[in-house]
Amino acid sequence: MERLEAFEAMLSDIQKQAEFEKRQMEELRAAGKEKTVTYRQYFGNRMFYKMMLDKYREYGLLP
């Protein structure tokens, strides 16, 4: 059971972080700062989160 709880906690954290970074990117984009290091780091992170969440969907762990 601990393993399932750990998975659920990890999944929740990934989803929260992905949403936070999405909002940050929107704010940076609105300020015209798409070429900053911070924006690019968030972009890279978002690609990683998307890959992970897509893999979870592939295995039926997410709708």
Image: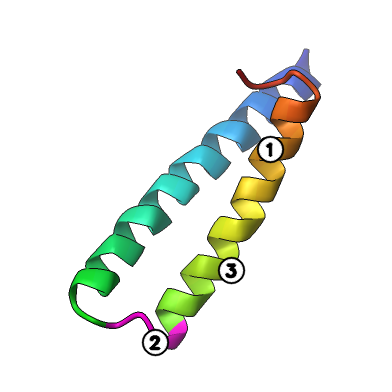
Reading the image, the residue beneath label 3 is: 44
Estimate how packed mark 3 is, as few (under 14), some (14 to 19) or many (20 or more) residues with alpha carbons within 10 Å: few
Which residue occupies 42% across, 79% down? 38
Label 2, label 1: how many angstroms apart (C-alpha)?
Answer: 27 Å
Estimate how packed mark 1 is, as few (under 14), some (14 to 19) or many (20 or more) residues with alpha carbons within 10 Å: some
Which residue occupies 64% across, 36% down? 10
The type of residue carrying mark 1 is: Asp
Label located before the other in sequence (3 or 2):
2
Estimate how packed mark 2 is, as few (under 14), some (14 to 19) or many (20 or more) residues with alpha carbons within 10 Å: few
Q: Which mark is residue 54?
A: 1
Label located before the other in sequence (1 or 3):
3
Label 1, label 3: how many angstroms apart (C-alpha)?
Answer: 15 Å
> For the magenta stretch, what is the residue range?
33-37
Which residue occupies 47% across, 49% down? 17
Q: Callout 3: helix, strand or loop?
A: helix
The type of residue carrying mark 2 is: Thr
